[in-house]
Amino acid sequence: MIALDDAAAMRRKAFVDAARELFFANGYAGTTMSSIASKVGGSKTTLWTYFPSKEDLFAAVVDDIVASYGQVLQIDLPLEEPVTEVLRRFAQVLMATLLSPPLLALYRLVVGEAERFPHLAETFYDRGPRRGKARLGEWVAEKMVRGELRMGDPMQAVYHFAGLCQSGLYQQAVLGLPQGRDHHRVADEIDAAIDTFYRAWGPGA
């Protein structure tokens, strides 16, 4: 027999999974709480006991995807290792995460709804990109103090590095272009990003 807490957790997960599928298929505005409840086979009242609003449910969908695919939020950033080695490992995990179908679908959803529902973009950014960049920013700041990177704004350096990593294949993948499916290019693009970043932020820059 399933314990009550386990049953409640399974019910909650069913609502999150249904919401994710419907958000991706119909957009945020095109998805109703009633349609989510109907897909799971429960009442809207039951759904409201888990998620008081559609925004709360969207946040749960983001958290679920980030928990499953956001390995970049947990990647080790040892201070003892050389800058380029850590950045390469970080970039490999970052790009594998961003190019995963669920993350691409979530990003497209957020961008498509951002003008009408700016709070969705804020929720997505706070729960994913902001956290990852903050962790890397702390590491970069320490590397600057140690003289392994030139002094400057650590977060500006992080934005530069993230932008370099996402400047080619990723943009094509977001747009659904055929070139965006050629993941063999990722390693070369990461190498180019690290080279360009180090020219700008290395200790001799």
Image (cartoon, helix red, strand yellow):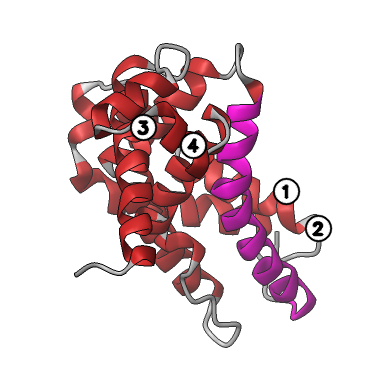
User: Is there any visible trace of residue 191 in the rendered image?
Assistant: no
> What span is colored magenta in the figure?
119-147
Residue 38 vs residue 169, the one in the foreground: 38
Find disc 3 in the rendering and name its residue.
19
Q: Predominant secondary structure in magenta?
A: helix
Asked if the residue at tag 1 contacts the one at tag 2, i.e. Cβ–Cβ closer than 8 Å, the answer is: yes
- Relative horizontal placement of residue 21, taking residue 84 as reference (left or right): left
Q: How far from the left and from the top, in percent, is residue 165?
A: 45, 46
Is residue 128 located in the magenta-colored stretch of the structure? yes
Q: Which residue appears at 53% of the width and 79% of the height?
A: 82
In front: mark 1 or mark 3? 3
Q: Disc 1 and disc 4: Cα gap in Å? A: 32 Å
Q: Amino acid at mark 2?
A: Gly
Which numbered disc, 1 or 3, marks the residue that appears first in the sequence? Answer: 3
Q: Which residue is situated farthest in the bottom direction here?
A: 80
Q: Disc 3 and disc 4: Cα gap in Å? A: 7 Å
Q: Amino acid at mark 1?
A: Gln
Q: Which residue appears at 35% of the width and 64% of the height?
A: 4
Q: How far from the left and from the top, in percent, is residue 2?
A: 24, 67
Determine the secondary structure under disc 2: loop
| Mark 4 crowd level (few <14, some 14–19, many ≥20, 10 Å Cα) | many
Determine the secondary structure under disc 4: helix
In front: mark 2 or mark 1? 1
